Image (cartoon, helix red, strand yellow):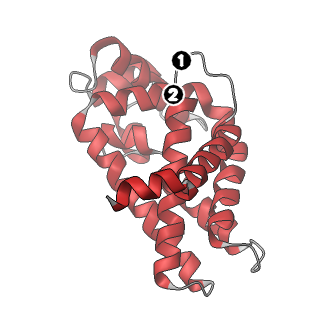
């Protein structure tokens, strides 16, 4: 059995997703994942701490890239636009090419309460990281927090639609639509009036 291959992490993720689909997350063991991938358990632990981490392999990279995109954005760009542009850039360069795998992963995560809770925690950490970067760039703390939260809300709505079976539009396109919908909802006088009652 081969001990190491340059694409080991990807092979382990693919094997894990297959097994999660076939027999569920809880019933799948690390030994089975390694065997399905044609690798050793030692190789598995060289890449992941446990089987949950197989599903969150991109989280740290995505956060780092989004924050980097925000850091390089023009200082004159409004904070919400800055975050949306960063999310769109990462969607186009990282997520779009992994759409099928990401959709399969999303299905596993949403079907498991523990994994779903972990996903919410990761999203909260990303929101905090975005708000911190915006504040570092000179935006007031509350403005940074609101911009980060609004952008992540739109991102989650777009992501949910993007992973729906049969959806063909890009995540970037759906994010633009979600931001527009959010903006329309917030600026709608009828909506504000209903909240004031």
Between discs 2 and 1, the one toward the N terminus: 2
Q: Evaluate whether residue 173 shows in this view.
A: yes
Q: Which residue is mark 2?
A: 103
Q: Is residue 31 above or below residue 57?
A: above
- Residue at left 46%, top 52%? 191
Q: Nearer the viewer, residue 109 or 9?
A: 109
Using a 10 Å C-alpha cutoff, classify the residue at mark 2 as few (fewer than 14 neighbours), some (14 to 19) or many (20 or more). Answer: some
Q: Nearer the viewer, residue 197 or 123?
A: 197
SS label for mark 1: loop
Q: Is residue 111 left or right of residue 93?
A: left
Image location of residue 118, percent across then percent down: 30, 48
Image location of residue 197, percent across then percent down: 31, 58
Q: Which residue is mark 1?
A: 165
Viewport quadrant of the N terminus:
top left
Which quadrant of the structure image shows residue 41? top left
- Residue at left 26%, top 31%? 112
Image location of residue 54, percent across then percent down: 40, 38
């Amino acid at each position: 059995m081969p001990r190491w291959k340059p694409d080991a992490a990807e092979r382990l993720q693919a094997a894990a997703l297959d097994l999660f689909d076939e027999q569920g997350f809880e019933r799948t063991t690390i030994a089975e994942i390694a065997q399905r991938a044609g690798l050793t358990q030692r190789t598995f632990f060289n890449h992941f701490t446990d089987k949950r981490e197989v599903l969150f392999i991109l989280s740290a990279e995505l956060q780092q890239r989004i924050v980097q995109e925000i850091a390089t954005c023009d200082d004159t760009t409004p904070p919400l636009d800055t975050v949306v542009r960063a999310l769109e850039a990462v969607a186009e360069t990282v997520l779009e090419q992994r759409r099928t795998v990401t959709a399969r992963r999303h299905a596993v995560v949403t079907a498991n309460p523990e994994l779903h809770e972990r996903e919410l925690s990761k999203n909260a950490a990303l929101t905090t990281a975005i708000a911190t970067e915006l504040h570092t760039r000179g935006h007031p703390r509350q403005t940074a927090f609101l911009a980060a939260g609004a952008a992540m809300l739109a991102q989650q709505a777009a992501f949910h639609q993007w992973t729906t079976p049969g959806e063909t539009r890009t995540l970037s396109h759906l994010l633009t639509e979600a931001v527009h919908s959010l903006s329309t909802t917030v600026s709608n006088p009828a909506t504000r009036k209903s909240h004031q009652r």
